[in-house]
Amino acid sequence: MTEAIPIYRWRCAPTHLKTQRQLAALGLRPNGQDIAGVLPLPKQGDRVAYLFDVNLAAPKRTPSPAQEQALAKATLAHQIKAAERRGITREELDAIGDPGPAWTDPAPVSAPVNAFADVTHVNAFGAGLEQEGVER
């Protein structure tokens, strides 16, 4: 006889149950464990989030140098295709060199101007808040 998977309401799941994204943020992976719970997503129709037990999760595996190289190559190809869709050729991407002094010398940043710095706070009746005893 199989056990039913518990269904939790939004924000009511136990703290040791996490989604795959939450596990990934913690540097963990589900490690082949069964689903420990289901969380129906509000306003998403029939979509659900599967919950996994943190205590059974394992650390993420580190990729090998060959995997990292393959990932970098695929990412570059994806970026080149995206740039070409926007009218930038591969030659233009390869020709990008020194951006000039604008990137190495930080420009002085001026403080933003507050247009409301001298305005006295007034409530709906026209009286100042300081007169009503309201502390800010």
Image (cartoon, grey):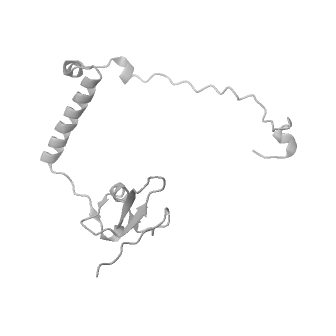
How far across and down, in percent of the image, does residue 41 sit?
44, 57
In the rendered view, would you say 70 is above or below 50? above
Q: Residue at x 38, y 57 (%)?
A: 22
Depth check, front residue: 106 or 55: 55
Name the quadrant containing residue 89: top left
In the rendered view, would you say 99 is above or below 114? above
Query: Is 21 placed left or right of 14 in the picture?
Result: left
Query: Is 134 placed left or right of 7 in the picture?
Result: right
How far across and down, in percent of the image, does residue 94 sit?
20, 22
Name the quadrant containing residue 45: bottom left
How far across and down, in percent of the image, does residue 7 sit?
42, 69
Query: Is 33 placed left or right of 124 in the picture?
Result: left
Name, please, the residue furthest toward the front.
45
Name, please, the residue furthest toward the bottom.
1
Depth check, front residue: 6 or 125: 6
Quadrant (top left/top right/bottom left/bottom right) for the C terminus: top right
Quadrant (top left/top right/bottom left/bottom right) for the N terminus: bottom left
Depth check, front residue: 121 or 34: 34
Depth check, front residue: 104 or 10: 10
Q: Residue at x 31, y 19 (%)?
A: 99
In the rendered view, would you say 17 is above or below 124? below
Q: Residue at x 48, y 65 (%)?
A: 9
